[in-house]
Image (cartoon, rainbow, N blue to C red):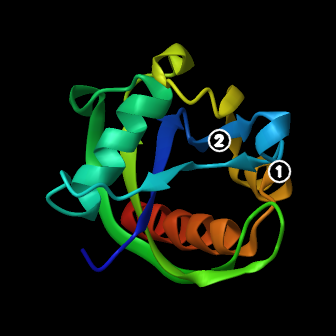
Amino acid sequence: MKHHMVEGWLYRKVNNEILYLLLKRSSDKGGFWQPVAGRVETSDADTKEAALREILEETGISKDKLGKFHDRIHEFTINKHYLTQQPIPPIHEVAHAFECFTFKCNMDMNNDQEHETYGWFSYEQALKLLKWNDNKDAMIKLNRQINEEKI
Protein backbone atom coordinates (compact mmCIF):
# COMPACT_ATOMS: atom_id res chain seq x y z
CA MET A 1 0.00 0.00 0.00
CA LYS A 2 1.30 3.44 -0.91
CA HIS A 3 0.54 5.18 2.40
CA HIS A 4 2.12 3.89 5.57
CA MET A 5 0.61 6.08 8.30
CA VAL A 6 -2.74 7.76 8.85
CA GLU A 7 -4.23 10.44 11.07
CA GLY A 8 -7.89 10.42 12.07
CA TRP A 9 -9.01 13.89 13.16
CA LEU A 10 -12.28 14.12 15.08
CA TYR A 11 -14.20 17.32 15.63
CA ARG A 12 -17.50 18.19 17.22
CA LYS A 13 -19.75 21.21 16.86
CA VAL A 14 -20.97 22.59 20.21
CA ASN A 15 -23.21 25.63 19.99
CA ASN A 16 -21.23 27.77 17.52
CA GLU A 17 -17.80 26.41 18.44
CA ILE A 18 -15.79 23.59 16.89
CA LEU A 19 -13.94 21.34 19.34
CA TYR A 20 -11.13 19.01 18.28
CA LEU A 21 -10.20 15.72 19.93
CA LEU A 22 -6.55 15.35 20.92
CA LEU A 23 -4.91 12.43 22.68
CA LYS A 24 -1.93 12.81 25.00
CA ARG A 25 0.72 10.16 24.46
CA SER A 26 2.06 8.45 27.55
CA SER A 27 5.32 9.91 28.86
CA ASP A 28 7.37 6.91 27.66
CA LYS A 29 6.06 7.59 24.14
CA GLY A 30 6.81 11.33 24.12
CA GLY A 31 4.09 12.85 26.33
CA PHE A 32 2.78 15.11 23.55
CA TRP A 33 -0.72 15.87 22.24
CA GLN A 34 -1.78 14.61 18.82
CA PRO A 35 -4.79 13.42 16.82
CA VAL A 36 -5.52 9.72 16.45
CA ALA A 37 -2.66 8.27 14.41
CA GLY A 38 -1.27 4.91 13.41
CA ARG A 39 0.01 2.55 10.77
CA VAL A 40 -1.97 1.48 7.75
CA GLU A 41 -2.32 -2.30 8.06
CA THR A 42 -2.35 -4.73 5.14
CA SER A 43 -5.92 -5.64 6.13
CA ASP A 44 -7.08 -2.02 5.58
CA ALA A 45 -8.74 -1.46 2.20
CA ASP A 46 -7.57 2.17 2.12
CA THR A 47 -6.45 5.03 4.35
CA LYS A 48 -10.03 5.96 5.29
CA GLU A 49 -10.60 2.44 6.61
CA ALA A 50 -7.26 2.61 8.44
CA ALA A 51 -8.30 5.90 10.06
CA LEU A 52 -11.65 4.41 11.15
CA ARG A 53 -9.87 1.37 12.62
CA GLU A 54 -7.35 3.54 14.47
CA ILE A 55 -10.14 5.77 15.82
CA LEU A 56 -11.95 2.71 17.18
CA GLU A 57 -8.75 1.21 18.64
CA GLU A 58 -7.50 4.42 20.26
CA THR A 59 -10.77 6.02 21.39
CA GLY A 60 -13.47 3.35 21.33
CA ILE A 61 -15.51 5.61 19.03
CA SER A 62 -17.24 3.51 16.38
CA LYS A 63 -18.15 4.46 12.83
CA ASP A 64 -21.84 4.89 13.76
CA LYS A 65 -20.86 7.85 16.01
CA LEU A 66 -19.19 9.65 13.09
CA GLY A 67 -20.68 11.87 10.42
CA LYS A 68 -19.24 14.06 7.69
CA PHE A 69 -16.00 12.76 6.19
CA HIS A 70 -13.16 15.06 5.08
CA ASP A 71 -10.90 13.17 2.69
CA ARG A 72 -7.15 13.81 2.69
CA ILE A 73 -7.09 17.12 4.52
CA HIS A 74 -3.29 16.97 4.62
CA GLU A 75 -0.43 14.73 3.47
CA PHE A 76 3.21 14.79 4.44
CA THR A 77 6.35 12.68 4.72
CA ILE A 78 8.16 11.81 7.94
CA ASN A 79 11.94 11.39 7.67
CA LYS A 80 12.94 11.27 11.37
CA HIS A 81 11.91 9.09 14.30
CA TYR A 82 9.46 11.04 16.46
CA LEU A 83 11.35 10.37 19.73
CA THR A 84 15.02 10.11 18.74
CA GLN A 85 14.94 12.44 15.71
CA GLN A 86 17.27 9.96 14.00
CA PRO A 87 16.83 9.57 10.23
CA ILE A 88 14.40 6.82 9.13
CA PRO A 89 13.19 5.58 5.74
CA PRO A 90 10.52 8.04 4.54
CA ILE A 91 6.97 7.35 5.75
CA HIS A 92 4.05 8.95 3.94
CA GLU A 93 1.19 10.08 6.22
CA VAL A 94 -2.37 10.96 5.19
CA ALA A 95 -4.79 12.89 7.42
CA HIS A 96 -8.55 12.35 7.22
CA ALA A 97 -11.21 13.91 9.45
CA PHE A 98 -14.68 13.04 10.67
CA GLU A 99 -17.40 14.94 12.44
CA CYS A 100 -18.09 13.16 15.74
CA PHE A 101 -21.39 12.88 17.62
CA THR A 102 -20.06 11.86 21.03
CA PHE A 103 -17.67 13.30 23.62
CA LYS A 104 -16.98 9.98 25.30
CA CYS A 105 -13.79 8.07 24.63
CA ASN A 106 -12.80 4.64 25.92
CA MET A 107 -9.04 4.50 25.72
CA ASP A 108 -8.90 1.14 27.52
CA MET A 109 -9.53 -0.63 24.21
CA ASN A 110 -6.02 0.17 22.99
CA ASN A 111 -3.74 -2.74 23.87
CA ASP A 112 -0.64 -0.58 23.31
CA GLN A 113 -1.73 1.94 25.99
CA GLU A 114 0.00 4.65 23.98
CA HIS A 115 -2.15 7.49 25.32
CA GLU A 116 -2.79 8.55 28.91
CA THR A 117 -5.66 10.97 28.43
CA TYR A 118 -7.73 12.88 25.92
CA GLY A 119 -9.53 16.18 25.63
CA TRP A 120 -11.80 18.20 23.38
CA PHE A 121 -10.23 21.58 22.68
CA SER A 122 -11.06 24.79 20.87
CA TYR A 123 -9.06 25.57 17.74
CA GLU A 124 -6.80 28.00 19.60
CA GLN A 125 -6.21 25.61 22.53
CA ALA A 126 -5.46 22.69 20.22
CA LEU A 127 -2.99 24.68 18.13
CA LYS A 128 -1.07 25.55 21.31
CA LEU A 129 -1.06 21.93 22.51
CA LEU A 130 0.05 20.27 19.27
CA LYS A 131 3.78 19.62 19.10
CA TRP A 132 4.30 18.77 15.43
CA ASN A 133 3.96 21.32 12.63
CA ASP A 134 2.40 18.76 10.30
CA ASN A 135 -0.37 18.14 12.87
CA LYS A 136 -0.89 21.90 13.12
CA ASP A 137 -1.02 22.21 9.33
CA ALA A 138 -3.65 19.44 9.14
CA MET A 139 -5.79 21.08 11.80
CA ILE A 140 -5.50 24.51 10.15
CA LYS A 141 -6.66 23.03 6.84
CA LEU A 142 -9.52 21.14 8.51
CA ASN A 143 -10.65 24.23 10.42
CA ARG A 144 -10.65 26.21 7.17
CA GLN A 145 -12.78 23.53 5.45
CA ILE A 146 -15.30 23.47 8.30
CA ASN A 147 -15.60 27.25 8.40
CA GLU A 148 -15.98 27.50 4.61
CA GLU A 149 -18.94 25.08 4.84
CA LYS A 150 -20.73 27.47 7.23
CA ILE A 151 -20.76 30.30 4.69
For the residues labelled 1 and 2, say whether their Cβ atoms are less than 8 Å apart: yes
Vertical order, 59 against 99 (above or below): above
Name the side, left or right, on which 9 lies relative to 54. Answer: right
Quadrant for residue 39, please give it: bottom left
From this viewpoint, is residue 104 visible? no
Q: Residue 103 appears at what percent x and percent y?
A: 51, 22
Judge by depth and name the residue closer to the eye, 63 or 114.
114
Kind of residue sitting beneath label 1:
Leu
Residue 137 placed where, x, y %? Answer: 64, 75
Q: Which mark is residue 56?
A: none
Residue 134 lies left or right of residue 142; in this view the side is right
Disc 2 target residue: 22
Q: Residues within 10 Å of mark 1 (few under 14, many from 20)?
A: some
Disc 2 crowd, CA 10 A, few/some/many (<14, 14-19, 20+): many
Q: Position of residue 22 (x, y in %)?
A: 65, 41
Residue that carries the numbered disc 1 in the rendered image:
129
